[in-house]
Image (cartoon, rainbow, N blue to C red):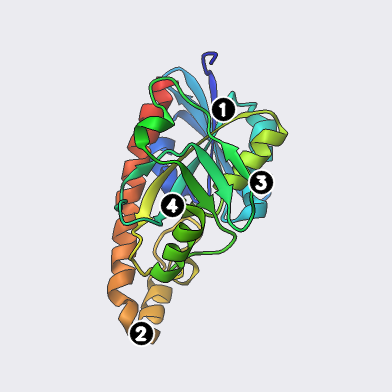
Amino acid sequence: MCPVKRVGIVTAIAREVTFVIDRLEPKNRDERNHRTLFSGDFEGKQVSIIISGIGKRRAREATDALISKAMPDIVISAGFSGALTRGLSVGDIVIPKLVTLDGEDRSHRVARLPGITTNETGYEKILTARRFIAHPEEKEALFNRSGAVAVDMESFFVAEACAARQTLFFAIRAISDGATAIIPPPQAIVDNAANLMRKEAARYCVKNPHMILPTIMFMVNLTIASRALGRSLLSILRLL
């Protein structure tokens, strides 16, 4: 693998990679087509981070826009994932060999990087779903059907866009909810940057009192996952 000078990162929400954004110097911000692109230098590398939003279309379009704008040597799909196996806990980092699409026999390989191989993590694959997975029963069914250890809503579509543009693809996810956790629908309690909407969250909890503790834990776990992901991403950037 040739030395990497330009790195692109695709993430659904800014909170997932705030740890990295804050360390770019100088930090530039470009708002266009309802997407935000952060760019700057980190230890001699040009790093561009695009905030895609959640889901298939946004992930594809943001990846394509990132490649056209920044021409990265590698694109990293980074963000939060729900665990599908009890062997994973909040804050654990997953670097898979494959990303697959739920309900279809399609997958994309994750690039091997110097100093960090997918074999070292012990995780074979993660699954991209087209909808939000909130309940333990759904997670168990996905694990039994796919064998994937974690689920997100973007990685496969980022990989698909990279393949179309012949750009190297890598994926890293931080676990934000365990396999047995029940979590609230994010759109009911957080904004597009994953910041707590206090009035909306209070209203949701009043209507769903059994979800008060899960909602509190969900917000705490987002912070844990964000820090873990940020530290791991910085380590990977240094190794590239």
Quarter of the C terminus within the rendering: top left
Q: What residue type is labelled 2?
A: Val
Picture quarter containing residue 183? Answer: bottom left
Circle 1 residues within 10 Å: few <14, some 14–19, many ≥20: many
Q: Distance between the residues labelled 3 and 4?
A: 20 Å
Specify few, some or many for label 4: CA neighbours under 10 Å numbering under 14, 14-19, or 20 or more: many
Placement of 57 over or under 119, stated as above or below = below
In whole angstroms, how far apart are the C-alphas of marks 1 and 4?
23 Å
Q: Please, what is the three-letter code of the amino acid marked with disc 3?
A: Arg
Amino acid at dot 1: Ile
Q: 126 or 193: which is nearer to us?
A: 126
For mark 3, what is the residue? 60
Distance CA(mark 4)–CA(mark 2): 31 Å
Cα–Cα gap, marks 2 and 3: 37 Å
Residue wearing tag 1: 74
Q: Earlier in the sequence, mark 4 or mark 2?
A: 4
**Residue beneath disc 2:** 206
Label 1 – label 3 distance at C-alpha: 15 Å
Element type at marker 3? Answer: helix
The answer to whether residue 149 is above or below residue 191 is above
Q: Which disc is residue 150 wearing?
A: 4
Mark nearest the camera among 4 and 2 is 4
**Mark 2 Cα shell of 10 Å, populated few (<14), some (14-19), many (≥20):** few
Contact flag, marks 1 and 4 (Cβ < 8 Å):
no
